[in-house]
Image: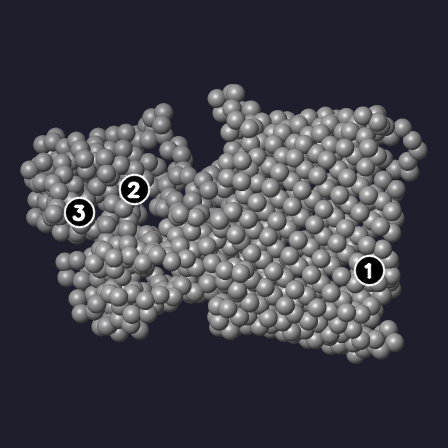
Amino acid sequence: MKTKINPIAYMLIMAGFSYNNDLLAKKSDYIFDSAYVNGSDVTRFNDGQQLPGKYLVTVSVNEQRKKVGSYKVNFEYRGETLTPVLNKEKLALFGINPDKLKLTLSGDGNEIDFDRSDVKFNFSFYGMNLTIYVPSKALVNKTSELAHESQWDDGINAFILNYDAKAWHRDVNYDSPDNESYYLSLNPGMNVGSWRVRHSGIWRKGYDGESSYQKSYTYAERDIRDLKSKILIGESSTGSDIFGSVPFSGVKLASSDDMVPYYDRAFVPAIRGIANSVAQVEVRQNGYLIYSTEVPAGTFELTDVPAAQGETLDVTVREDNGAEQHFSVPYNTPAISLKEGRLKYELTGGTYRPYSRSAKDDSFGQATLIYGFNDTLTGYTGLQVSEKYQSGAAGLGFNLYDYGAVSVDGIYSKNRYSENKTGSAFRVRYNKLIDTTNTSFALASYQYASRSYSTFDDAMEPGQSYSSGKRKNDFSISIRQELSDYGNLNLSYSKTTFWDKKDESYANLNYDSSLFGYVGFSLGWSRVLEAYRNTREDIYSATFSIPLSRFSGRKLNANMRYQIMNERDNSVSNSLSLNGNAYENRLSWNISQGTNSRNHNNNRTSANASFKHSFGTVNGMYNYSPVSTQFGGGMNGSVILHEHGLTFGQPVYDSAALVDTNGESGIQITNKSGVQTDNNGYAVVTPLNTYRMNDISIKQARLQSKSDFKQTVTSVVPTSKALVYAGFKSVTGEKGLFKLKDKNDKPLPFGAMVSVIDQDNVGVIGDEGQVYLSGLKESGVIKVRWGSGVNQTCSIPYVLGNKNSAGLYVSTFRCQ
């Protein structure tokens, strides 16, 4: 049913919109009464007769489906209807399988003919919403947070330099070779096409006067999309799923979890059942509905439920006749687990990259493979080979449902660097969640069958393993107990026994909760036992935190924190601190005072603060104790050289966007606090979610500015470490609010279309003949049309007069 709307309501709806040639409109929910608009031909509104072109629209699939994202869609007329121009590839972007649809193509043979296909649409101009309707059989039954691969953007070519510079000065009550210390971390990199080149190094000069430079890595990396993998050439480390991580210089080819939807790479228990009719299946977790779908009569299996790990799934099957089935599926994740049919691999070849100068740098190869056989069983295996060292591993991960999850594996090694010694190690990992008591616990046991077992690191750096001891057994257990409104209790314990020295153990107990609903507190205890030193250290602590906004009407965003704990020398230390933030979290600060009951030289007063800006972060600190005074400061950020110039920003550790506002400076990025465009109209927005849709929004330019943005939101989908371009088009010129009248001095009719000859701006006349236009030249000719008749159009020459205080030219012009 259509609703009649008067001009005042229409003006409220249209307020804030600037029109241009790229914009289009389709009115599908309202009709306008021409009696209200002085004879203006409003059939363009009633019949959806709007300007064809491209819109940035929010796309939904079927009514009950969630929005799938924002896309630029081209609209053209098909008869009298403004119709989206879609093809099979576009449907795939929206989570629709085109192979399961009856499609008739038109135009160049690639466009969907909606009249002859079982795909329908509805476009709402006022909400900028496009809804696609398809049969349920064509819906891809996989919830994926990934953007479609065709949208992945490798970004622009650029040189990127991350830096972190610090300097400190101290005055001490004893002799010191130097009172200055410096730290400089440089991470230069270059993006060329899909290749990423990165280097990391740190230079430092200590208070002892010694300076050094340490290189961390240098490598080149790129995606291999067909394999959902990455290839890396240079210096890096292997993964640690099966073997310990090994530093190397060489080549690594490995599958990438980032390029696979989360629900396809993570273990999720399958939900199986039988429906007696077409039924609605609902899945809840902790009482919240997390998944709902319709299944046909017969057996069904759901494998893509977006569930949180470790929480039981409660399933309801609601039949057509109202009958319901209820059952639960435990969610226990093995230590190593993959979904059914998922394969994860890594292939590495190169030389060992040693930590120490005495270590070997032999060539080696490593291969690992993990495969999900079904929702119960995951298998994994691996191999490490060098000239004098070989190691093989194999294991299984089991989902035991009500009894938890367990992984077992074994590793065999042969080390010819050490008298041809062989050895083996076995590992068991188990975890379980008890729903009735909200208790979760995990345990792991590593048993080294003989002292001759060695890892590849042991073989390459024998001095390291000798100094740290040869392990015989590692055991650890952790328990978390949720106490509802009374807080949480965490307990962990680990013990290591050695072949050649006495045991080591560590225990930790922590309880945290709140008092009166706003005072946070925690109680802690930890014990370190080193039997070979005959030492046992017990440390107790209590911490209280009070938000001061509770007493200041939320005007003060700060917290007061107090902690008391005993030290290793049996003294007692106290610490009182104030910390907070301001200016939309751009400024962070902390002031603290600490005392020690035994050694007053350990009393300390400190203050530090940091401030984030578009070009980076500056920070400063001050410490005072009876024996020393220290102060210092630093700055970190990024410098990006791109084809348009040089831009400074926050550190870029993964993907980022280069925002371009067409030379307009001072434009704020609304979804990134403290970031605005520089004098050249550029800004850096980081971090972004790789392979996923990221919306970047800006504030509209000030009225006093000569720019007006056609849109203030754009979406980008960066690949790993990409610098993507996010441009915002604008019209440049003056802004005017005009009252347009006909030759008889009457306001031109509401709804009349307005354009400016040889200029890129379009508007619609509102009440009393008013229209807002931007991008205006000092003079020009305005064209107005309010119908198809010869006498329903006019031309209006204009010359801009004086601006008002708001930056607008306000004038009245008449038809010629």
Mark 3–mark 2 contact, CB under 8 Å?
no
Front-most of residues 687 and 316: 316
Between the C-alphas of marks 2 and 1, the distance is 74 Å
Q: Mark 2 or mark 1: name the one nearer the start of the chain.
A: 2
Q: Mark 3 or mark 2: name the one nearer the start of the chain.
A: 2
The residue lying at 59 percent from left, 50 percent from top is 652
Quarter of the C terminus within the rendering: top left
The residue lying at 59 percent from left, 47 percent from top is 480
Give the amino acid type for the residue marked by disc 1 in the picture. Answer: Phe
Front-most of residues 578 and 669: 578
Q: Mark 1 or mark 3: name the one nearer the start of the chain.
A: 3
Mark 1: secondary structure: strand
Mark 1–mark 3 contact, CB under 8 Å?
no
Q: Position of residue 558 (x, y in %)?
A: 57, 27
- 175 is higher (above) or lower (below) than 400: above
The residue lying at 67 percent from left, 42 percent from top is 509
Q: Is residue 651 visible?
A: yes
Numbered tag placed on residue 654 in the rendering:
none
Q: Is residue 230 visible?
A: no
Which residue in the protein does label 1 denote?
498
The residue lying at 58 percent from left, 27 percent from top is 546
Q: Position of residue 740 (x, y in %)?
A: 19, 34
Numbered tag placed on residue 29 in the rendering:
3
- 689 is higher (above) or lower (below) than 42: below
**Nearer the camera: disc 3 or disc 2:** 3
- Name the outermost residue toward the top: 552
Which residue in the protein does label 2 denote?
18
